[in-house]
Image (tube, coloured by chain):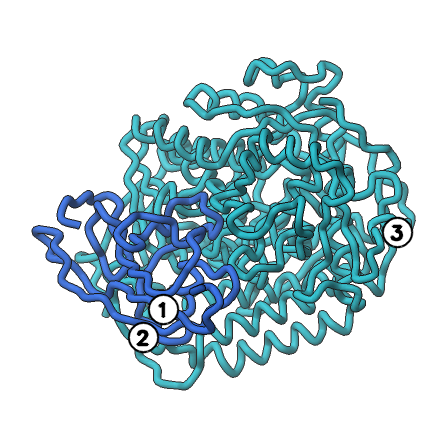
Amino acid sequence: MVKLDKNLIKTDILIIGSGGAGARAAIEASRNDVQVLVVSKGIFTRCGATVTAGLFMDVPSSRIEDVCGIPGIMKDDEENFCKDMFEEGKFLNNEELVWVHCSNAAKYVKELVGWGMKIEGLNQSPGHKYPRSIISSGRSMVQALKREIKKYNVKFLDNTMITNLLTNNNQIVGAVGVKLTSGDFVVIKAKAVILATGGAMGLYPITTAPQELVGDGMYMAFEAGAKLIDMEFPLFLPACLYWPKSMKGLDLPYTCSSAIGGWWLNAFGERFIKKWDTLRMEMGTTRDIASIAQAMEILEGRGSPHGGIYVSFKHLPEELITAYFEKDPQVRNYKYGGFSLLDSNMDPRKVSYEAGPAAHYWNGGIRINKKCETDVIGLYAAGEVQGGTMGANRLAGNAITECLVFGALAGLNASLFVKNISFSNIHNNQLEKYYERIYKPLKQKEEIDVIQIRKDIQEIAFKFAGPVRNKAGLINGIEEIEKIKRDLLPNINVNCKEMIYNREWMQALEIDSIVTILESVLRASLMRNESRGALYRKDYTNTDNRDWLKNIIVYKEDGKIVLDALPVTNSIVRLPKPEKIPYMVPKWEFSKQC
Amino acid sequence: MTENKKEIKVSVYRGFCELETGIKTGKYQQYKIPFVERMTILDVLNYIYESLDRSLSYYYSCRTGKCNGCIVSVNDKNKYACTTFAKDGLKIGPAKGFRVVKDLLIDFSKKCKFS
């Protein structure tokens, strides 16, 4: 029997994840005078994707002057912003979510500027017809959120991994997990739960995302009965470092390529992007096309020694490179993130980079409506973990906007919801089951290596569910995953049996998330017999607007994974003609307006 | 040059601290690490964890010098593990100024002058 009295915590709203969306939700809910507890697997302000972001925040260009004092282009408006999102998302975006996103963006970014976030400039990112991206830094944003959050009585529980949600008749009643610094079982009774756990980029071996983002939130929602949407569209960022090992996943070559125009070259020195995006080339192409183009060169054997392609700036005048690396806020003084390019033998005037696609963002996620409600009563989702907003592909700069807008709305709607209800009972059989799941890896003795399994799964993900996929590979991937589920997962165990911050134990518990999310990516990709946005099927190279203007929904029924395809609707823009067209790029030419 | 060596030796703090005073009660343990070009302190810790001793406790998130989570003391100076290059003979301990939870994991909310 699990004893409740010792470990039980009670809160009106439990927020899981302490990045941008979680913090923003906490502020909004606290304003409505409800108890808020933010639980994080990491440490508040020192984890999650927000703090590592570049960071761009998109708002309609016409609103930029009001938001931060820099003049934008007045021809732009909310509707134009929506149109670009639909065009980039290949019309799979949920129209309500897109409208909420575009019409609230300026309001919430302006508020953040008021809390002290520093603005560094304005950018027109690829895929946008107007300059909409306000430039700041993840650190500056997180510090602004931290200052604001301190005004309220928000409670925090860091280094605590929530492993499962508790439900009663399809309604949230709380969650369980483990306090990593002590190994104690944690039970939280809550009237509502907001998932703000970010994406699942950790499925892949090379990623720009922090190491902890492995899809925990999506897994927990799926297990609790919520539905996932657009899972076949993980977004890859092209031209991320493949070498040296210590900088794997760093998006430096991509950032510089977008800014000053790097050349992407294969092993024969060809600028292969011209086969894919003749008009816009490296500087103006979007991330989906670029990732596919790079992956094709790598897969077809025209890659670099460390499995990537080359990114070179050596065709540019040295003065131009020097000016950029001395002055631009993102790379000032030849520093990127915390790396000094001069100290690490990465001087762009002297070397070319070995780079390629890295998992960057999760376009899909938990299905929500415009109030951030999921298919489970009392369960909300906000930020990268939510699905539907971005459709088949996300515009650059929209991730931070999404976590601000929907973080705030999730906080608001959850706080209104909890005012009218009381705490519900927790079922003891759920507690027993999840307690067993958490402590099982410590008790078992089989020779199964957690780290090796994770590496094997990442290889499967990259090989069969990377930027380029096909039927045979996807079926192969599903079979491999089923084998792992059948033979290895029930016997998962850890070498180290310690209770205090046992990293191996945490990584063992994450494997369920990784496997479940990867399976949903593989199955949804196999179902979609076409290429669209971030999904490229080598065996179906057309975009099929006749049969596939549909969202794929993934959920669990009677213990089994089920997939449905639902047609999209749109009253803001006209949907494309119902015909098959070659997977290709938009016809307008990219020209910077700022 | 140390950078050309095939193997480096580093010592890493293992253990706890006294709860009342914050005085460290653990000790430094030496590890032999196969050296890889432009290897960072974080690469060293990951190698120890994955290949030598799964019980090593340490924290990191972004791997790119932005989240401030992986701060450790390197030869008695606080540095980011993810962006500091490794070399032979380094002493890696918990970040100075905070209470130790275990090994290199610290409690950022508890400042401590004895560190």
Using the image, tell me which numbered label, if any, was put on residue B32: none
| Residue annotated with mark 1 | A505
Dots 3 and 2 on the same chain = yes
For marks 3 and 2, the one nearer the N-term is 3
Chain in blue, by letter, is B
**Number of other residues with Cα within 10 Å of mark 2, as a class: few under 14, some 14 to 19, many 20 or more:** some
> What colour is chain A?
cyan
| Residue annotated with mark 3 | A275
| Residue annotated with mark 2 | A496
Q: Position of residue B104 (x, y in %)?
A: 28, 58
Q: Secondary structure at mark 2?
A: loop
Instruction: State which chain disc 1 sits on.
Output: A
Q: Residue at x 57, y 52 (%)?
A: A345
Q: Residue at x 38, y 41 (%)?
A: A45
State which mark lies toward you, 3 or 2: 3
Q: Position of residue A558 (x, y in %)?
A: 54, 68
User: Can residue A203 be seen by looking at this rendering?
Assistant: yes
Q: Position of residue A427 (x, y in %)?
A: 33, 60
Instruction: Look at label 1 and name its amino acid.
Output: Trp
Q: Quadrant of residue B13?
A: bottom left
**Residue A312 in the figure: left or right of residue B53:** right
Dots 1 and 3 on the same chain = yes
User: Can residue A195 be seen by looking at this rendering?
Assistant: no
State which mark lies toward you, 1 or 2: 2
For marks 1 and 3, the one nearer the N-term is 3
